[in-house]
């Protein structure tokens, strides 16, 4: 079940403005209580408990009546206190309610739940930036049931992520505190989708220092930034402009291929998917070749390529022998891919 949570990057779950407003209101309430109590002690010569009781009943407009009979001075003081003090008290209460409504009660009270939820995440993805690129990444993760956390420092983007039902942290994604809050140590991948190449490079550098095994994918707006991002630890650098240009060219030269990729692979009405599936030790595939494994017959999925000893092998021959640790790139329905994953002793990545 999707959960909408919101947090600050470097501070706490509350913004500094909320802290300040609540603290000032607390001081005002204390001042009203003290001022009212002292006033009744001076004008009525009551003890502090009776004076405090009269002050509270007056401010809250409960209407229990006077503790003792009021003198003329006491009545005049009570009139002034009601006109000034009760109005201020009601303003304070209404503003506190407004703070809670603006700040989102889940965000205020959900810090413990958020920490608990994130601490339970493992092998999840971290998406830095909820712009157009980041939003598409999150949409894909959500549709494929991949657990993820969004990080963005723009309150407007954070609100959009919340409305979409995503787990989101507000703040600078390059801050170590925020990356730790997102579970960087246990995450399997991080997407640096900010529009600023420098920020993406710095995030990649921080992520690599905090988790050596994490897979880092960066968005690059300038071709010259790719080398720096890879030096910072990025496994893959993707330029939206380059990808867009290639797809547009392919749409002209190979329109049927483009239609197949767009309609079949990205339309919810079609069940065909492409997945990468690792071969675990002791599986039915390890040690057998592609021909003897009869993958198409047993699962229905089609093996398009595989990685072996760090090399990508496309259109493997039937004599190709599978090894433990190989990663298959297969095409098929969700059910077919599940069967292939069972044969490989793993789950689709």
Image (spheres, rainbow, N blue to C red):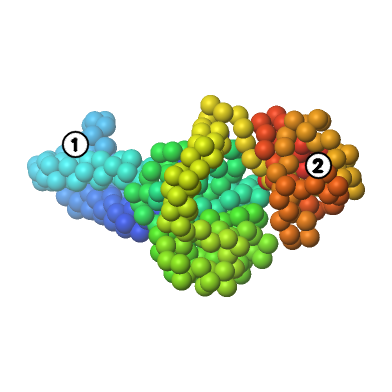
Residue 314: x %, y % from top left: 71, 50
- At 78% from the left and 56% from the top, the residue drawn is 308
- Depth order, front residue of 31/21: 21
Observer able to see residue 94: yes
Give residue 188's quadrant in the image.
bottom right
For residue 103, side relative to residue 120 (left or right): left
Task: Report the residue marked by disc 1.
Answer: 69
- At 26% from the left and 44% from the top, the residue drawn is 95
Residue 116: x %, y % from top left: 59, 47
Q: Which residue is outermost to the front?
A: 253
Q: Which residue is outermost to the top?
A: 269
Observer able to see residue 23: no
The relative height of residue 300 versus residue 194 in the rendered view (above or below) is above
Badge 1 element: loop
Badge 2 element: helix
**Which label was assigned to residue 344?**
2
Question: Number of numbered discs present?
Answer: 2
- At 64% from the left and 47% from the top, the residue drawn is 120
């Amino acid at each position: 079940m999707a959960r909408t949570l919101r947090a600050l990057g470097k501070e706490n779950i509350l913004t500094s403005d909320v802290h300040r407003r609540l603290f000032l209101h607390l001081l005002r309430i204390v001042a009203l209580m003290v001022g009212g109590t002292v006033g009744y002690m001076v004008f009525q010569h009551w003890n502090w408990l009776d004076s405090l009781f009269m002050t509270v009943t007056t401010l809250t407009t409960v209407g229990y009546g006077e503790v003792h009979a009021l003198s003329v001075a006491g009545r005049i003081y009570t009139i002034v206190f009601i006109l000034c003090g009760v109005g201020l008290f009601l303003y304070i209460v209404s503003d506190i309610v407004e703070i809670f409504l603006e700040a989102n009660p889940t965000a205020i009270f959900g810090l413990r739940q958020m920490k608990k939820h994130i601490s339970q995440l493992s092998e999840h993805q971290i998406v830095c930036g909820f712009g157009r690129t980041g939003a598409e990444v999150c949409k894909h993760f959500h549709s494929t049931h991949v657990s993820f956390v969004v990080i963005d420092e723009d309150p407007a983007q954070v609100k959009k992520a919340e409305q979409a039902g995503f787990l989101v942290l507000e703040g600078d994604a390059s801050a170590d505190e925020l990356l730790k809050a997102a579970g960087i140590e246990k995450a399997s991948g991080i997407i640096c989708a900010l529009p600023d190449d420098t920020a993406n490079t710095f995030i990649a550098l921080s992520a690599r220092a905090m988790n050596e095994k994490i897979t880092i994918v960066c968005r690059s707006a300038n071709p010259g930034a790719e080398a720096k991002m890879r030096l910072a630890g990025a496994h893959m650098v993707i330029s939206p402009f380059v990808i867009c240009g290639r797809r547009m060219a392919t749409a002209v030269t190979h329109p049927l291929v483009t239609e197949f990729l767009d309609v079949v692979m990205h339309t919810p009405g079609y069940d065909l998917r492409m997945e990468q599936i690792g071969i675990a030790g002791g599986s039915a595939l390890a040690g057998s070749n592609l021909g003897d494994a009869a993958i198409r017959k047993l699962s229905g999925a089609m093996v398009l390529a595989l990685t072996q000893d760090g090399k990508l092998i496309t259109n493997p021959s039937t004599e190709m022998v599978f090894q433990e640790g190989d990663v298959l790139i297969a095409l098929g329905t969700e059910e077919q891919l599940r069967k292939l994953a069972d044969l490989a002793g793993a789950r689709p990545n």
